[in-house]
Image (cartoon, rainbow, N blue to C red):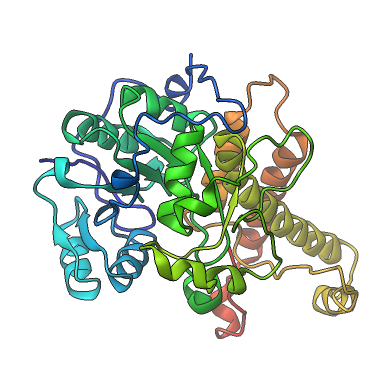
């Protein structure tokens, strides 16, 4: 078995295998997967014996996302396997998360994909070639009925493309990661997560693995046309407390990750959720940068203005720093723009990108850098 990829938020190692299609080509002619009507589930894989068979889990990509996932899996008692093209990342995961090296994909029950979705040479530009090369390998070796869960950030339509590549033999779900390392207790692997499946049977399988017993899944309302909310379903009940959901005594009767979930009726909603979250964060920071430039141009004390604005309960002006960086926000904002089939891209996001560029130019011209502030700036959640 040879998996070729680089991990989400981890090393900068390049994929050994580059597919012949570009990012945009990946999403062309995406298959039109028919979703079953509410309550009509495909029973092809859903025997009770297999539905309980979540023992061996492989995490592909052991960086900032994959390593905490692997550690969490081990803590829940799963046989946790791992792969990363970077040997250092693999060795770290073996030591910290007690993962094993996978040698036979046919034995794996669940594949969790946590690889980076940016170009190896440009962390600000989206690309899913590495992820799709992994799927090709899984397609060749994995057993039918296994679950493939994509936690990597992906553009709209990718999950259906993956389902086609797997020849409909495996269940495909998308549970985009939400993880903040500085507040792992409250915002770690086990926080409330959005989840979607390519088909209803895929979603049922994913819900069972991530959080809830099979018997409770029968009452999941998948049809959102009536505007009903899908969060979350223990025998049809909902609650605002994710902690109460995760600690529900029903979870003790089956082996799962115990993660509270918000199921969505269409997997593309799950895909868009993550990139829209980060695009929204990008907008928030860009406005703070624009307000800073406004203050400088008009002789206003920005720090005092920000402090006064944030006294209102529903206002939270962020603290601008050196510009919008990191490996998530710029890349995912571009991914959101590129995922749209509309010829008219989001004007507000395009303006936000230009605002960030103007802010960077100003700071460069003035020779301003965050490090000159003696580390007094607070970390900004992304």
Q: Name the quarter where the C terminus is drawn.
A: bottom right
Q: Name the quarter where the N terminus is drawn.
A: top left
Q: Is residue 360 above or below residue 108?
A: below
Where residue 355 sits in the image (x, y, percent)? 72, 49
Q: Can residue 3 be seen from the camera position used here?
A: yes
- Taking the spot 23% from the left edge, 35% from the top edge, the residue there is 138
Q: Is residue 19 left or right of residue 243?
A: left
Q: Is residue 9 left or right of residue 77?
A: right
- Total residue callouts: 0
Residue 344: image quadrant is top right
Where residue 350 sits in the image (x, y, percent)? 70, 38
Q: Can residue 121 be seen from the camera position used here?
A: no
Where residue 301 sits in the image (x, y, percent)? 85, 76
- Taking the spot 77% from the left edge, 40% from the top edge, the residue there is 348
In the picture as drawn, the residue positioned furthest to the top comes out as 29
Looking at the image, which is closer to me, 103 or 275? 103
- Taking the spot 72% from the left edge, 52% from the top edge, the residue there is 283
Residue 271: image quadrant is top right
Q: Is residue 13 above or below residue 248?
A: above
Where residue 373 sits in the image (x, y, percent)? 60, 82
Q: Is residue 208 above or below residue 126?
A: below
Residue 232: image quadrant is bottom right
Q: Is residue 150 left or right of residue 19?
A: right
Looking at the image, which is closer to me, 362 or 341? 341
């Amino acid at each position: 078995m040879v998996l070729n990829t680089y991990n989400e938020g981890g090393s900068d190692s390049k994929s050994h295998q580059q597919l012949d299609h570009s990012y945009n080509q990946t999403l062309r002619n995406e298959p039109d997967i028919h979703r079953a009507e509410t309550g009509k589930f495909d029973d092809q894989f859903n025997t009770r014996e297999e539905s309980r068979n979540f023992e061996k889990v492989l995490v592909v990509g052991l960086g900032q996302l994959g390593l905490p996932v692997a550690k969490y899996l081990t803590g829940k008692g799963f046989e946790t396997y791992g792969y990363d093209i970077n040997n250092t990342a693999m060795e770290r995961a073996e030591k910290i998360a007690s993962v094993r090296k996978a040698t036979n994909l046919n034995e794996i029950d669940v594949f969790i994909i946590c690889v980076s979705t940016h170009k190896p040479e440009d962390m600000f530009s989206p690309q899913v070639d590495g992820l799709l090369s992994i799927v090709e390998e899984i397609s060749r070796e994995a057993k039918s009925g296994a679950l493939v869960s994509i936690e990597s950030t992906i553009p709209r339509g990718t999950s259906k493309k993956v389902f086609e590549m797997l020849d409909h033999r495996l269940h495909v779900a998308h549970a985009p990661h939400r993880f903040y390392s500085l507040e792992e207790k409250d915002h770690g692997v086990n926080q409330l997560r959005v989840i979607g499946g390519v088909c209803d049977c895929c979603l049922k399988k994913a819900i069972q693995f991530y959080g809830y017993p099979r018997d409770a899944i029968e009452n999941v309302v998948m049809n959102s046309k009536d505007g009903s909310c899908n969060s979350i379903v223990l025998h049809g009940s909902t609650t605002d407390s994710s902690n109460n959901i995760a600690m529900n005594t029903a979870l003790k009767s089956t082996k799962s990750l115990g993660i509270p979930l918000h199921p969505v009726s269409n997997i593309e909603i799950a895909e868009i959720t993550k990139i829209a979250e980060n695009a929204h964060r990008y907008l928030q920071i860009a406005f703070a940068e624009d307000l800073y430039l406004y203050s400088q141009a008009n002789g206003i004390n920005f720090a005092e203005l920000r402090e006064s604005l944030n006294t209102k309960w529903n206002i939270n002006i962020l603290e601008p720093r050196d510009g919008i960086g990191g490996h998530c926000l710029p890349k995912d904002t571009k991914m959101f723009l590129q995922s749209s089939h509309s010829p008219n891209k989001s004007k507000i996001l395009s303006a936000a990108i230009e605002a960030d560029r103007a802010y960077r130019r100003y700071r460069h011209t003035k020779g301003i850098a965050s490090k000159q502030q003696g580390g007094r700036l607070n970390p900004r959640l992304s």
